[in-house]
Amino acid sequence: MMKKWIACCLCVLFLVGCTSTKEPLNVNKQNHFVIQNQVECELIKNYCSDEITPSHQKHYLNSLQVSHQAHQFIDVIVKTTNLTSSTQNITSLFSGHYEVNQQKYDLKIAIETADYNKIMTKGILDSSESRYVHLYCEVPKVEIKEGAVLYFTVLGERFQYSFTPETKEQHDSKKTLGDIIDYKDTQIVLDAMGTSKQIEPSHKGLVYSYIPAPDDNEIFLYVKCDIKNKTSQTIDLLSYLNCVYQTGQQRIPADFIKESHDHQSVSRSSVIEGLQTKTFYVVIPGTLDDFKQKGSIQCSVEGKTFVLEI
């Protein structure tokens, strides 16, 4: 009997010793990753600041303040989308911690409302809904030197994001990814930017459509954005939103590609129906040489201009 008991203990110890802990997946800003076909996450931006505010900078209702003037927040904004047919509790999706200058800080969570104008500590994500989630910690300013590492878990899957926090600045005309731009007739959310040989939908199934660059030697420079038509009338972006890529003396006009409502196909369309929100790609075709030099995308909307630096 004693021999059997010892043998069982040895087997348990052997199995435990052979079990490997899965390393966290390294992710970068603008990475999309889907967890268990339930949640899609995209790292929008990171920054350090004395205050955490909603993305709607001009008309927000509240904010979070540091507890001490010698502290700052380190904040990573994650666009979180519910891919299921049921609601999900946002605060139960994320857990983890930060490591800053070899010190560990607990991860805290703040959630923006659907209108991007208020910060909440709890929230429910409806089916197919997307929200901005702030994964943050409060750190003494003297500890923020070279970089930070965010270790976070979503539905049991572990991720690691290493970055250097950027200083949060306000510019009326200069915009960055994650910004919410509000106009009389529309609201524009700047989601992602990059280059590609073709524009593909966000959610690709076994069969999906895509739009290639016009010529074999060309690529697309693109800005992905969600545009909400606040009016009851149809808006054609070709006449409403004028975007041009400029580098030196060269100016290349932009075109529009629209994603379907289920995000599984794309089409060459610039039309958005009344009271609808659609995902668009502002695309500039060109060669690699066209985009080698530092440039910017200048967009004119309702008599106002904003700039995205490339």
Image (cartoon, rainbow, N blue to C red):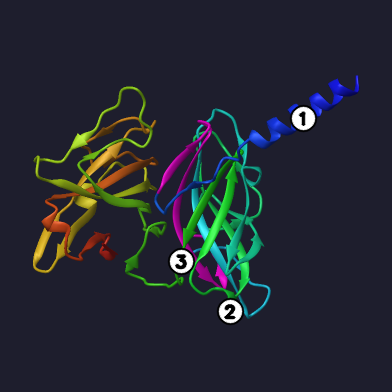
The secondary structure that dominates the magenta segment is strand
The numbered mark, 3 or 1, whose residue comes first in the sequence reads: 1
Q: Amino acid at mark 3?
A: Thr
Image vertical order of residue 31 relative to residue 210, above or below: below
Residue 270 colored in magenta in the image? no
Residue 164's disc number: 3
Q: Residue at x 53, y 32 (%)?
A: 36
Of 265 and 100, which appears nearest the observer?
Answer: 100
Image vertical order of residue 39 relative to residue 290, above or below: above
User: Could you tell me how far apart the alpha carbons at marks 2 and 1 are, in whole angstroms?
Assistant: 50 Å
Q: Amino acid at mark 1?
A: Leu
User: Could you tell me how far apart the alpha carbons at marks 3 and 1 are, in whole angstroms?
Assistant: 46 Å
Question: Hey, which quadrant is residue 249 in on the image?
Answer: bottom left
For the residues labelled 2 and 1, say whether their Cβ atoms are less than 8 Å apart: no
The numbered mark, 2 or 1, whose residue comes first in the sequence reads: 1
Label 2 environment density (alpha carbons within 10 Å; few <14, some 14–19, many ≥20): few
Any part of residue 110 in sight: yes
Image vertical order of residue 79 relative to residue 248, above or below: above
Task: Describe the element under mark 1 as helix, strand or loop.
Answer: helix
- 293 sits to left or right of 178: left
Range drawn in magenta: 31-55
Residue 142's disc number: 2
Q: Residue at x 45, y 41 (%)?
A: 33
**Residue 122 percent coordinates (x, y):** 66, 49
Residue bearing the label numbered 1: 10
